[in-house]
Amino acid sequence: MEKMRARNLNSVFYAESYHPIQAGSIDGTDVLPHDNAIYRAHLCSSIGLYDPFGDPKIIGDPYCTLFVGRLSRLTSEDTLRKVMSKYGRVKNLRLVRDIVTGASRGYAFVEFETEREMRRAYMDAHHSYIDDCEIIVDYNRQQLMPGWIPRRLGGGLSGKKESGQLRFGGREKPFRAPLKPIPYEELKKLGIPPPPEGRYMSRFQVPSPPRRERDLSDREEGSHRRSSKDKNRTEDALKSSVDTEEEHYRRSLSHREDEERHYRRSSSYREDEEGHYRRSSSHQEDHSRKRRSSERKEEKASHYHHRGSSEKEHRYRSSESEKHSRKQKERAEHSHRREKYSRRSPNED
């Protein structure tokens, strides 16, 4: 419970419509003015003495106009235009000056070309420095915030503590979460908008400026433009689809041609391989034939050699046997002769 209470105390909310008594309260729950300036601003708002669109100097689109405050008294229009040109194209610039002396009052209104450029400056230019002074920026509350009362009539927002006229609910000093019970009946009687229930923000979150409300004619024009854009997009999509189909068809044709070329190359390669195979097979057959013929010649030569060697051996053996037989015959004849001479007796001689 204490955590929820502490979280609620640290949260803030911003005013969507202006009420002088609520702007003088830190939490938006006061029902009585606490100073004369708030009483004077409440009197002006209840009687209707202030017209926010009655100033003839106000020109331009309020949704593209930015309020710049806390400027240096020495800052000129050229310096301010040069700084604001960083965030977008500046269409019109009005530095508020004193009617009698012509000196700068310390605030200005800058109109940009588009609402997007104004929002960019609204986000980025807050608490930036111009001529050594920290500035604040806000949207054009004079024309866009219902019930607005300016500072010169006791209203306005923010302010310094020393002046005793602090105003809450704006970007610089937002409302705190209600610190006491909310008197709904009294706020309803006085026409003061009650604080929101549960829709609180952190101090680090940036409040969004109001957006332009479109009329029926603008909506119809916007819808007509959107429909024409959609038609153009559909036509572009159809054209792109047709172009993509044609491109796909061309790619498929080129792919087919590439496949046919590849097939032709592969067939020619196969034919070359078959020719090479045939040549190699014929070469192998010739080689085998030559080998066979050489083997046959070798066999014949070996046969003839074997035959010649066998015949030579047979002849050598037959000659040897003949010699041996001759020697045996000679030996036999010699022995026979010896026997003959030995048989003879000496008496006979």
Image: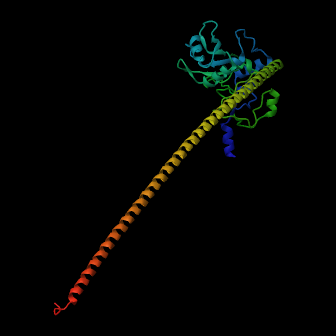
Q: How is the image coloured?
A: rainbow
Q: Of all residues shown, which one is farthest toward the bottom?
A: 347
Q: Of all residues shown, which one is farthest toward the top?
A: 100
Image quadrant in which the C terminus is located:
bottom left
Residue 24: image x %, image y %?
Answer: 70, 26
Q: Of all residues shown, which one is farthest toward the front?
A: 348
Residue 296: image x %, image y %?
Answer: 47, 55
Is 100 on the left-hand or right-hand side of 52? left
Say whether residue 135 is visible: yes
Vertically, is 253 above or below 299? Answer: above
| The image quarter in which residue 202 lies | top right
Is 47 on the left-hand or right-hand side of 344? right
Residue 5: image x %, image y %?
Answer: 69, 42
Vertically, is 16 above or below 76? Answer: below
Residue 100: image x %, image y %?
Answer: 63, 6
| Label tally | 0
Residue at point 35%, 67% (across, down): 315
| The image quarter in which residue 58 lies | top right
Residue at point 59%, 24% (across, down): 127
- Residue 115 vs residue 334, the one in the foreground: 334
- Residue 129 vs residue 167, the one in the foreground: 129
- Residue 311 vs residue 100, the one in the foreground: 311
Say whether residue 33 is visible: no
